Image (tube, rainbow, N blue to C red):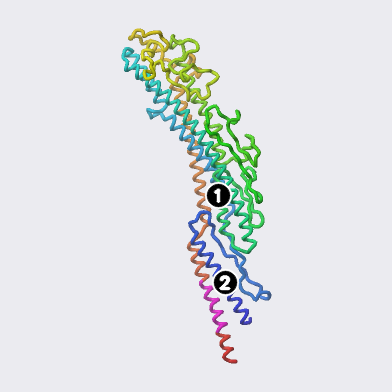
Amino acid sequence: MSITAAISNAISGLTAVSRGTEVVSSNIANAQTPGSAARDLNISSRSLYANGGGVHINGVTRAVPAAILADNRVAQASFGKSNTTYEFFRTIESSIGTADQTTSLNGLLTAFDTALAAATASPDAPVRLLDVANSAKGLAEKLNSISGDISTARAAADTTIANDVQRLNESLAEVARLNRQITIAQSKGQDASSLMDMRQSAVDAISDIVPVQEVSRGAGQIALFTKSGAALLDGTTPSTIGFTAAPIIGPEMSVANGQLSLLTLNGEPLSSGQMALFKGGSLEANFKIRDELAPEYQSRIDAYAVDLYQRFADPAVDPTISAGLPGLFTDRQTALDPAAQVGFANRIQMNALVDESAGGQLWRIRDGIHAASAGDVGNSSLLNNARAALTDRAGLATSGQTAFILATQLMSFAAANRLNSETSSQHDKSYLNSMTASLLSYGVDSDKEFETLLQLENAYTANAKVLQAAHDMIDTILRLT
C-alpha cells in the first residue's frame, strides 16, 4: 500500500470517527426527548481498487421498531376512547349520586318521603308543610341538575370533537410539510433523522384521537391511514376533515333531525355508517357520548321525571286536580304535554301554588293543590295519598315500580356503567404503559453510547497512529534526499 493510500484510509477513518462522535453526542443529548429515536452510524468498507480502501459513511439510521410503534399508537387510541367514556360515566354517576349520599336522587326522594310522613303526623303544623314543599322543590331541582349535567356533557363532547378535528388537520399538515423537508434533505445527502423525529411526534400526537397506520413511501415519505382504511395523507396534500360544532345542545337535538353534525372528509359528508372509518379513538368516544350514551341517560331521567309527575297528577291522589291541570309537580307551571316528554327532567318544577316564595299557600299541600280554600287543619288524608303515591305500582304511573325502586335502578345503572368503563380504561392504560415501556427499551441506552464512544476513541487513536507513521516515513525520505 502506498503512503498516499495509507493517508487516505486514515483520513476516512477519522472522518467516520468524527461523524460517529456527533451521532453519539446527539443520542445522549436527546435521550429524554419525546419522539427522538436512537441513531446508528452506518458504515462500510470502501473498495480498495476504486477508492484506495478505507471507510465509507453510508448514512445515519434511526432505530425505530415499526411494529411496536404501530402497536403503541393503537394502544393510545384505545386508551383515548375508553378513558373518555369513563370520564363521562363518572360525571353522570356523580350527578345522580350514590346510595350513601343525602344529596343523591334516592337521598332527596327519601327526604321527601320523610317530610310527607312528618306532615301526615302533624298536618296542622306549617313547618311540616314547609318541609314537604322544600323537599319537593329540592327533588325537582335535582332532576333539573342531572338533566343539565347530561346536556353539558353532550356539549362538551361536541366541543371536544371540534378541537380534535382541528388538531388532526393541523398535525396532518405538519406531517405533509415534514415529508417534503425529509425528501429534500435526503436528496442533498443530508441527515434527516431530526426531521423524522419531529414527524414521528406529530403522528403520535393524534394517535389518541384516531388509530393511525403508517405506510412507508419512497424518498423517505410516509402515508397515513385510519385503522379502518380512510386515507389521511397519501401524497403531498393531506385529507381535510370537517366538523361543525353546535353553539348549544338541548335534549331534543340529534343528528337525525339535522341539528347536530357528523364529519366531512374532503368536503363530502359522511353517513352514520361511514363514520366507522374514524372509529377506535377519543373521536369515536365523543360522538358516542353525544349521540348515544348521553341521550340514553336523558331518556331514563326524563322517564323518571314523567313518572314522578304522573304520581302526583292523579285525581285519586288529589281530587282537586282536574283534566289539563298539573299536580304537585309541573312542566314549568303548566301540565305536561304527553308529546313533549323529551327533556322534561330539565323542565320539571314544583307547583308555584304551594311555594310561598312565589306567592303560593302551604295549606294546598294538605287540602289540595287546586282547592278553593283551606280545609280542616287536622285532615291528613291527602298527605297520606301523596305518600302512598311514592310506593304506588299502578295508578297513572306506567313503570309498574315504586318511585324508590326506579331511583335505585337509575343509580345502579349509572354505577355499573362507571365501573365497567373504569375497568376497561384501566386495562387499556396498562396495555399502553406496556407498549410505551417496550418502545422506550429501544431508545437511547447511555451505557451503550459510552461504550461506542470508547470504541470511537480507540479508532481515532489507531488512525492517528497511521497518520503519524506516514508523517515519520515522509520525514525520513526527505532527510535521505
Q: Quadrant of residue 37?
A: bottom right
Q: Which residue is mark 1?
A: 204
The stretch of residues the image draws in magenta is: 457-471
In 3D space, how far apart are the residues under numbered discs 2 and 1 (Cα atoms)? 35 Å
Q: Nearer the viewer, residue 352 or 136?
A: 352
Relative to 24, say whether 223 is above or below.
Answer: above
| In-front residue for pair 45/358 | 358
Image quarter hosting the N terminus: bottom right
For disc 1, the neighbor class at 10 Å (few under 14, some 14 to 19, many from 20) is many
The label number, if any, that marks residue 15 in the structure image: 2
Task: Report x, y in % for residue 169.
Answer: 59, 45
Please tell me how crowded label 2 is: few (under 14), some (14-19), or many (20+) other residues with Cα within 10 Å.
Answer: some
Q: Residue furthest bottom?
A: 481
Reply yes or no: does residue 459 show up in magenta: yes
Q: Main secondary structure of the magenta part?
A: helix
Dot 2 lies on which element? Answer: helix
Residue type highlighted by circle 2: Thr
Q: Is residue 98 above or below residue 66?
A: above
The C terminus sits in image quarter:
bottom right
Amino acid beneath label 1: Asp
Give the percent coordinates (x, y) of residue 278: 60, 41
In the structure shown, which secondary structural element does the residue marked by tag 1 occupy?
helix
Of 449 and 206, the residue lying toward us: 206
Q: Residue furthest right?
A: 50
